[in-house]
Image (cartoon, rainbow, N blue to C red):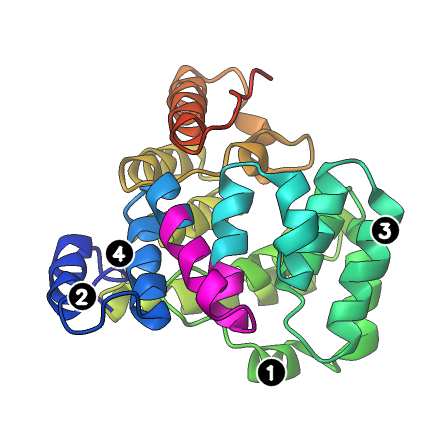
Amino acid sequence: HYSVVGQAEKGREMLSDLKRYLPGDAGLLASLGKVEVLDGNWAEADRLLSQAIEREPLNFVDRTWLSFTALGTEQYERLTVLGADPFKALAFSRLGRTEEALIQGADWVQKGNNPNRYFQMLIENGRFSELVEFLESRWTNLDALEHNFPDRSGYGAFLLGSVAHAYSRVGEAEKFEDTMARYRASLDWQVGQGADNWALARSRAHFAMLSGDHEGALALLEESFEQGALNLTMLTMETSVFAALRGDPRFEAVLSQMRQRLNEQRSLLGLEPITT
């Protein structure tokens, strides 16, 4: 809870106190790892979450957090082996193995799971119409989608963000406006509950871009970076909503700082730097 509301140090202190009583406990290691992810210490999060998974390999939630950490540090080959299924699909996509990615991603969602990462993958591949067709074939309306997968966790509203982005690209103005109203309501509710972390700031920046508020988006991206964000590829892809900011000095500064953070964290993990 402390990490979600921007108080990682309190969360770290509370969990560290428990370490005396629960040395090597998988749940405690994972909880500490989640704190480090939200505080921008990606390599330390990777170390802790990897230890947790070694102890409890079937823990899907912890594997999802480790997958998220590996995605941020661009460990795509590793993700194809140890990642939770939706992240495996995204890793295949980032490695250019699109057909494998699409099959694995669709299979995950067909089993009734959250389509968040699948939708992200479709957007990264420019398949906006496919996203809309898939969405409308599985859910009668957005009420049904939100009922199944409410975007209210405190980390933003990426599922609604993907849907809004897709509707904007296929020219469905009315559906776009409806989705944006839901997107705003979700973000406002999370802020109202005290959520304050880099994932939420990034989601709010995404919303600002779709609203045409580039200045607001830049301010939120800067805030997200300061809070620990590491999502370089998501920002630089041609299909990203942030592509419209390319060349802006503030945006390029965020990218440069994030590239430095990425390589610092990769170095701590014993990985080669990313140069592209």
Looking at the image, residue 276 sits to the left or right of residue 11; the answer is: right
Percent position of residue 148, x then y: 60, 83
Residue annotated with mark 3: 100
Please state which amino acid type lies under the numbered disc 3: Glu
Secondary structure under tag 3 reads: helix
Residue in the foreground of this view, choosing between 96 and 173: 96
Percent position of residue 244, x then y: 58, 28
Reading the chain from its start, which is encountered first: label 2 or label 1?
2
Secondary structure under tag 2 reads: helix
Reading the chain from its start, which is encountered first: label 2 or label 3?
2
| Span highlighted in magenta in the image | 47-65
Residue drawn at (67%, 60%), measured in percent from left and top? 86
Please state which amino acid type lies under the numbered disc 1: Asn
User: Marks 4/3: CA distance?
Assistant: 36 Å
Label 4 Cα crowd, 10 Å radius (few <14 / some 14-19 / many 20+): many
Q: Nearer the viewer, mark 2 or mark 1?
A: 2
Q: Are marks 2 and 3 in contact (CB under 8 Å)?
A: no
The secondary structure that most of the magenta stretch takes on is helix
User: Marks 4/2: CA distance?
Assistant: 26 Å
Figure quadrant of the C terminus: top right
User: Marks 2/1: CA distance?
Assistant: 36 Å
Report if residue 238 is visible in the image. yes
Reading the chain from its start, which is encountered first: label 4 or label 2?
2
User: Marks 2/3: CA distance?
Assistant: 41 Å
Figure quadrant of the N terminus: bottom left
- The mark found on residue 196 in the picture is 4
Please state which amino acid type lies under the numbered disc 4: Asp
Residue drawn at (53%, 62%), measured in percent from left and top? 64
Percent position of residue 16, x then y: 15, 61
Residue annotated with mark 1: 148
Reading the chain from its start, which is encountered first: label 4 or label 1?
1
Based on the displayed image, in which of its 4 quarters is residue 152 positioned?
bottom left
